[in-house]
Image (cartoon, grey):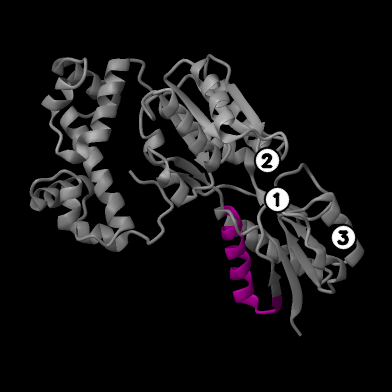
Amino acid sequence: MKRHVALIVETSSIYGRDLLAGIVRFMRMHDEWSVFLEQRDLFKQPPAWLNDWHGDGIISRATTPKLLEAVKKTGVPLVEVTDRHGEVDKPQVRSDDAAIGRLAAEHLLERGFQRFGFCGFSGEAWSARREAAFVASVEAKSSTSCSRYNSAWHGRAARAWEDEQQCMADWLAGLEPPLAIMACNDVRGQQVIDACSKLNLVVPEQVAIVGVDNDELLCRICSPPLSSVIPNAETVGFRAAELLAQLMNQEDPPEPMQLIEPLGIATRQSTDVVAIEDRDLAAALHYIREHACRGLSVSEVVKHNTISRSTLERQVRKYLGRTPQEEIRHVQIKRAKELLMATDLPAERIAVLCGFEHPEYLFVVFKRITGLTTTEFRRQAKPRSRGKIT
């Protein structure tokens, strides 16, 4: 006889959906559950039906004191996957927020930054844990203290977006570029990018930004696309289902609290940079990133920026280890990779979109840089690649 399990998990975020995918994977392996899932968002109140529900177990990511009280009345086992609060007196599986903060710090430190900021949500335990780990990591390896900005995510204390954007812009205006910022999640990362645009701060040359969750649609809507830490939400869901099965079988779980480390970082343009104090060089590199796929030449870069060709050649070699012409090709090939992975466009069309006058030249350059033909690269690329684009 199958056990009846309720999933109180939001479906409005990529994290919640990936968590559900992990639960489904466990179900497919064992085929012992009959599941009820209520479509919901993260802030919805506990469902009214729970008071009269007679099931066998619950996995919840929307736990509130009211829900805990309702669950206590049902007497059924509950596994907590909520990360919005501190420790709770229930078996719990969640992402390792400290590891997420440290990974973001390492990612930005590797790029040579010495000034840092953290942008989070106040009153959210997961954000606070990421902030503490990030700040400790960067301050241990830099000579300045990490600047912080926090405000309410929702509720009465949350500001209208226009007011929030102005407050965030005021915070950014008081910081000296170049600097690197960790946003507590991709929603916050998009807001930081928007605030930088309001101030005409160039991302990533003046402000590098990394978010968390790797919500691919949201990250690619950002301009430039947002780099993001990839939490292992699917494993969180799988482990939570595994833990609930043990509880329903009246077994003693080996670890009532389980922390799941992140998978890595999806590197996109918002951190694809090294820290550069020279503003003229930063502006020239930004110009290359913006115009490389329009058939840009090094002479045009010099013409439209306040930097001599000799200085451009020397400084680009110093910071990036390649020539300005190689940097233009680097941007073009990276864009070609993205189009090969994300679209079904023929390579000849991709060549045009990446600024190559003749498709044959794209094929030659692509093979020289990647070691693969465009066809081989597309065949090997996963449909939903979440790894690093180099």
Mark 2–mark 1 Cα distance, whole angstroms, equals 9 Å
The residue shown at (36%, 35%) is 272
Q: Is residue 132 visible?
A: no
Three-letter amino acid code of the residue under disc 3: Ala
Mark 3 or 1: in front is 1
On screen, residue 4 above or below 278:
below
Q: Residues within 10 Å of mark 2 (few under 14, many from 20)?
A: few
Mark 3–mark 1 Cα distance, whole angstroms, equals 17 Å
Q: Position of residue 380 (x, y in %)?
A: 31, 61
Q: Residue furthest right?
A: 73
The numbered mark, 2 or 1, whose residue comes first in the sequence reads: 1
Residue for badge 1: 43
The numbered mark, 3 or 2, whose residue comes first in the sequence reads: 3
Residue for badge 2: 154
Q: Secondary structure at mark 3?
A: helix
The residue shown at (44%, 26%) is 198
Name the disc covering residue 70, or none.
3
- The reply to whether dot 2 and dot 1 touch (C-beta < 8 Å) is yes
